[in-house]
Amino acid sequence: MILISGTTPEVDLPIALRSRIEERMACMAQGEPFDPDLHGQIVVVEEGDSLEAISTAVGFDILANAVTGVCFGEPGYEPSFEVCEENASCYELVFVFGDGDEGIVIFIPKGVEIDPELLAYCQTYATAAPGVDTP
């Protein structure tokens, strides 16, 4: 798992994914230099990351409703994300808690081995990002 902490991701990522992350960072920072402590956390899931490891890194179970505790796949489940988008290179989950000033964005790359339950979650809820044709 990669935690993005600067204005440009300092890790080797595919160009399309890097571009999408930089677009999201610019949107979150609204003209300021990106600061994860101010604007929110960005996480990139890597091949082999478990749901438990992802949830530990972000501080909550991403597949459970933050209010009711009902989990994905259980009757009455309602997701807690603000946005779940499918881009050509990845899925993007945006969570905003509290007064909406700060959030957590989780990028789930396509083309790598991702936890099957997380992949099913993204495929169930994702909508196509505006202006993006998805395969």
Image: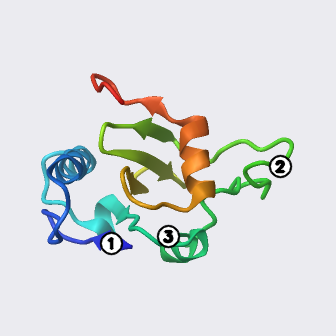
Tell me the tag on residue 2.
1
Name the front one of labels 3 and 2. Answer: 2
- Looking at the rendered structure, the kind of residue marked 3 is Val
Residues at badges 3 and 2 in contact (C-beta under 8 Å)?
A: no
In which quarter of the view is residue 56 placed? bottom right
- Looking at the rendered structure, the kind of residue marked 1 is Ile
Q: Nearer the viewer, residue 47 or 9?
A: 47
Q: Nearer the viewer, residue 42 or 36?
A: 42
Question: Which comes before the other along the chain, label 3 or label 2?
Answer: 3
Q: Which residue is mark 2?
A: 74
Question: Which comes before the other along the chain, label 1 or label 3?
Answer: 1
Question: Which comes before the other along the chain, label 2 or label 1?
Answer: 1
Quadrant that contains the C terminus: top left
SS label for mark 2: loop
- Horizontal side, residue 76 vs residue 35: left or right: right
Count neighbours of disc 2 (C-alpha within 10 A) and say few if under 14, some if 14 to 19, many if 20 or more: few
SS label for mark 3: helix
Q: Which residue is mark 3?
A: 58
- The Cα–Cα distance between marks 2 and 1, rounded to whole angstroms, is 29 Å
Q: For residue 74, say whether it is visible.
A: yes
Residue at 51 percent of width and 41 percent of height: 82
- Horizontal side, residue 47 vs residue 7: left or right: right
How many numbered circles are shown?
3
- Looking at the rendered structure, the kind of residue marked 2 is Glu
SS label for mark 1: strand
Residue at 45 percent of width and 61 percent of height: 113
Name the front one of labels 1 and 3. Answer: 1
Residues at badges 2 and 1 in contact (C-beta under 8 Å)?
A: no
